[in-house]
Image: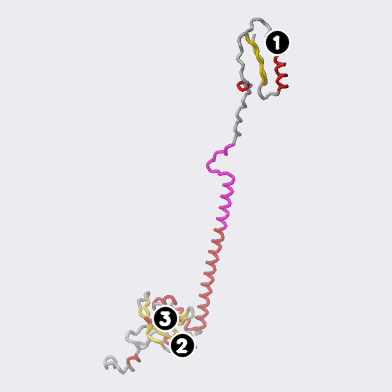
Amino acid sequence: MYGAMQCSRDLPPNDCADCLLSQLTNFTIEVRGDTMTTAYIKSYTCYVTYSMEPIEIRSPSTAEPPEIPSPLPAEPPEISSPPPAVAGFVSAPSSKHSKMNLIIAVSISMVVGSIFCLAILAWCYWRWQKERTDEMEQEDIFGDEEMKEEFRKGAGPRRFGYHELAVATGRFADSEKLGEGGFGSVYRGHIKDLNLDVAIKRVSKSSKQGRKEYVSEVRTISRLRHRNLVQLNGWCHGRGELLLVYELMPNGSLDTHLYNTDKKLSWTTR
């Protein structure tokens, strides 16, 4: 009969002796009988065996370690996925962001609209104030009730707008200037609406007599009608300007011919 016993390599001598003694006690009890040819008993740290045949002694390095069940792999934690998007609804952050954008857009629209309305009101007030000033200025210039009544009925000269006369003279260009006197300058112009060539007298602002001259000519010439007199077609006072619109004399003024020593008129022309 052959026998063998061995401990694990890392087991201290005292613990190895205790382990083998314990195994031998159990081994003696378990191997009773004559029919057994081989028997062994082992634990985690030592083992004991016997056999009727020679026993192969394993080195401590090749001793089979006890089988320890490997732990099961830990299951990954469940991550809850966000609920699927439903048409017509958005998540809370997106809804909050959209609401904020809507508030900002409405606020900006209200501010812009308010500024636009204020600008329109300011323009209307300026226009009303300007018309009122022009009317008061007209009443101050033409204090004669009879003349104001003639203008209302259309019997007197026509009142032109400043822009209309400025366009007719090319913004009072020097190339359109016909002459210049003590009370102002005279420009050639063409009024497209009437298809009429006119001479526009621009009363000098620096002339103290300009205002009186302006009123005097409107009052006097507008009531005179003669083929040998220059006809006053209209007038304008606006933007600080005093303008008189006469019919244009293509051949110039009569005095330029009467007192021209270089070129005398024939008796027929006279």
Q: Which residue is mark 1?
A: 28
Name the disc covering residue 213, or none. 2
Relative to residue 129, is residue 224 drawn left or right?
left
Q: Whole-Å distance between the Cαs marked 1 and 2? A: 155 Å
Provide residue 237's location: percent of width, then percent of height.
47, 80
Q: Nearer the viewer, residue 111 or 2?
A: 2
In the displayed structure, does residue 194 sit left or right of residue 76? Answer: left
Q: CA distance from mark 2 to mark 3?
A: 15 Å
Q: Nearer the viewer, mark 2 or mark 3?
A: 2
Marks 1, 2: nearer the viewer? 1
Q: Secondary structure at mark 2?
A: helix
- Check contact, mark 2 vs mark 3: CB within 8 A: no
Can you give x and y, in whole percent of width and height, for residue 203 in the image?
A: 45, 84
User: Mark 2, residues whose alpha carbon is within 10 Å: few (<14), some, or many (≥20)?
Assistant: some
Front label number (3 vs 1)? 1
Q: Position of residue 7 (x, y in %)?
A: 67, 20
Q: Residue at x 64, y 5 (%)?
A: 35
Q: How many marks?
A: 3
The residue that disc 3 covers is 234
Q: Within the image, what quadrant is residue 225 found in?
A: bottom left
Whole-Å distance between the Cαs marked 3 and 1?
A: 149 Å
- The structure residue drawn at horizontal position 52% and vertical position 77%, both measured from the top left corner, is 133
| Magenta range | 80-107
